Amino acid sequence: MPSVVTFIDLKQQNHTLGLFCVECNRWGEADISSLISSGRGEYSLTDAKFRCRDCGELAEKQLRPPVPVIGGAVAYIRS
């Protein structure tokens, strides 16, 4: 199993990082490419902190593996 520790690891393994604000009940997704291009590629995912754009509360992180494709259809709906 590949190791996913940094933002560069996320990109290389085609994972994404979901962000959830409990206060606003709102989902978002971290812009991994922007984080890497701004020099944060080697930052630890565990130590990284994200704040909600709307209320400023700390967001919960969710590591998301690549979306499986089953028979040509996406396995879940993505907005």
Image: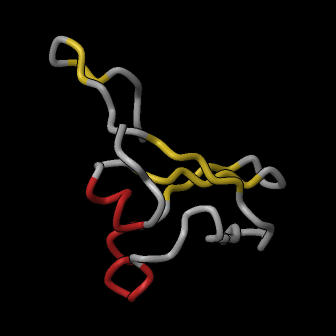
Residue at 41 percent across and 28 percent down: it is: 77
Residue 50 picture location, percent across and down: 65, 70
In-image side of 65 versus 62 (left or right)? left
Residue 19 picture location, percent across and down: 60, 54
Residue 8 picture location, percent across and down: 34, 67
Q: Identify which residue, 11 or 28, lies in the foreground.
A: 11
Residue 76 visible in image: yes
Residue at 70 percent across and 54 percent down: it is: 60
Residue 32 picture location, percent across and down: 39, 67
In the image, residue 57 above or below residue 76: below
In the image, residue 46 above or below residue 79: below
Residue at 48 percent across and 59 percent down: it is: 5
Q: Quadrant of residue 21?
A: bottom right
Q: How is the image coloured?
A: secondary structure
How many labels sit on residues? 0
In-image side of 60 versus 17 (left or right)? right
In-image side of 47 versus 67 (left or right)? right
Quadrant assignment for the N terminus: top left
Residue, far bottom? 39
Q: Identify which residue, 42 or 19, lies in the foreground.
A: 42
Residue at 67 percent across and 51 percent down: it is: 20
In the image, residue 34 above or below residue 2: below
Quadrant assignment for the C terminus: top left
Residue, far top? 71
Residue 35 visible in image: no
Residue, far left? 72
Q: Identify which residue, 62 or 56, lies in the foreground.
A: 62
